[in-house]
Amino acid sequence: MSSAEASSAAFATGQAGERSDVLWPLIVLTALAAFAIYLPNLADPMLRHDDYPALIADPSGFWAKTLSEGRWVNYLWHLRELVTPAWLNFAVYQLLWATFAATTARVALGPDAESFAALALALMILISPSAMLISLWFNTLIPGLALVALYAVLACVLRQSWLRVALVPFVVVTFMAYTTYPLLILIVALLATRQRSFLDLVGLMALFAGSMVLALLATYAINWQVHGIFGVELADWRDAQPAADVAGYLANLPALHESFDFILRNIGFNFWPATVFHLALFVGAALVLLRRVPMEALYLLAGFLVGVALVITQALKLGVLVPPRAFIFAWVIYAVIAVRAMQELSLSPGLAGRMARNAVLLVVGSILLQTFLQMMTYRDWQQETRHLAQAITPETTEIYIMGDASHLTSAMKAGVQSGIALDFRLHMMTGIMPESCDDADVRCDALATLPPRITGVEGLDVYQEDGVTLVHVTAKPET
């Protein structure tokens, strides 16, 4: 009996209490690892400019995304009355992701799996580069990730039949939080299958496809009732080029190429030898599973291919770039395949098993370090904006900003996507929402004639008079 079959048998006969006993330590260890690698971002977490409305519970700042992206679950989250600090929200988000990683590992390997394998898989899921990128929208994504984590927890306690019944509403609701979250639901359902067969796989895929259709119809219907549009209208910044015929699909091939180029560079942290290593490990591990446990491999690869097909469809149909953060599903499948192949090769002593274990350790160790270093890149922006906020006198009642803050060296290092990030950042720290000098040119010009106040931030001049502060960004875009 293979380790996969043994794990399935253990799950089928094990007691819920036994599963709980072994699950909690795994969740705790995975959460501690998450807090360790995100340590530079815990006290004052970096967040993207369009995540601030969720932080301050401002539904008006998110309303447009209900039409452009159908994110109705996230909109409801913006309606809450309780506003909690960013550091707490980030800690909750990481705890939820760690819970998903640990419970998915337990579902994949079973409660009697070797501790090393269970922790290795939990950590390998945790460190997904795509998950790291999307974590910068942690305030917005808390409710969606909570649902994903809940489904993974349910997979540890529910019978397979009930878990599949639950798949339908979970896919529908998580689709309205983030469009690739349903793929994580599918992966958990695939891993939780006890008696695998080709017909069962076809049935599960049909159930998922029907759930996705239902999710689309539900989202479109809500938009129709609220916005008067049956569907979504992509935001202008996406520069969508919807294809209506074969020529349109061919014209959108560059968007598809760019999407896969971005994700391949992302998984290797822009180091191509690392990307090649990941691809080789994925292919090699998949071949091991296809040879030793072919039906299990078929389930895993089916989930992977469904996700890739959805990405290809979106890129070719809409002509938009699919960002690397949307590929979380691919990394989760990769992690499961790699660790399961390690288990299979370790059933008998020999070089193959040791090499597989070393490969998994190399992936986990290197990306744990890379994630920590990536979190360090945000510190300059966070520190400089804190210095700026401290330089603004308590008497200030109005703040104006002249120039584009995204041109600051620290902003470029942190990948700040828009100058408005400074507006939201100052609002968070001072309680005052800055205004653009485009709406107050005369007032800004008058303030700019005053002696600048020293802030210690390169590329910024600060002018203050009579409770009014002008932040002049003097940094220019790199040529």
Image (tube, rainbow, N blue to C red):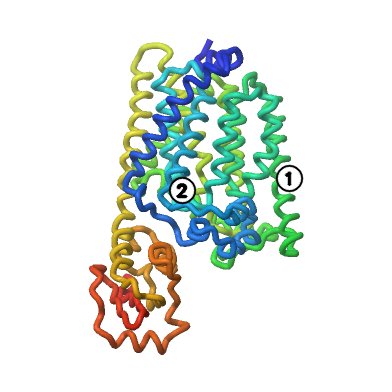
Task: Tell me what residue is drawn at x 36 percent, y 12 percent.
Answer: 349
Q: Is residue 27 above or below residue 233?
A: above
Quarter of image, res 81: bottom right
Q: Most extreme residue toward the front, as rendered?
A: 395
- At x 54%, y 58%, the residue is 57
- Element on which disc 2 rests: helix
Name the spot of residue 389 as percent of width and height, x first: 33, 67
Residue 120 seen by the camera? yes
The quarter of the rendered structure image containing the C terminus is: bottom left
Image location of residue 185, percent across then percent down? 60, 37
In this picture, residue 116 sits left or right of residue 70: left
Q: Residues within 10 Å of mark 1 (few under 14, many from 20)?
A: some
Q: Amino acid at mark 2?
A: Asn
| Badge nearest the viewer, 1 or 2 | 2
462 vs 260, left or right, is left
* Residue at image point 49% right, 39% down: 96
Name the residue at 34% across, 63% down.
Answer: 411
- Between 81 and 163, the one nearer to me in the picture: 81
**Image position, residue 231 (x, y; %):** 71, 58
Q: Amino acid under label 1?
A: Leu
Give residue 214's mark. 1
Q: State left or right for residue 306 relative to residue 339.
A: right
Tell me, yes or no, if residue 251 can be seen here: no
CA gap between label 1 and label 2 equals: 31 Å
Task: Say which element carries label 1.
Answer: helix
In which quarter of the view is residue 210 placed? Answer: top right
Against 380, is 205 above or below? above
Query: Mark 2 highlights which residue?
Result: 89
Mark earlier in primary sequence (1, 2): 2
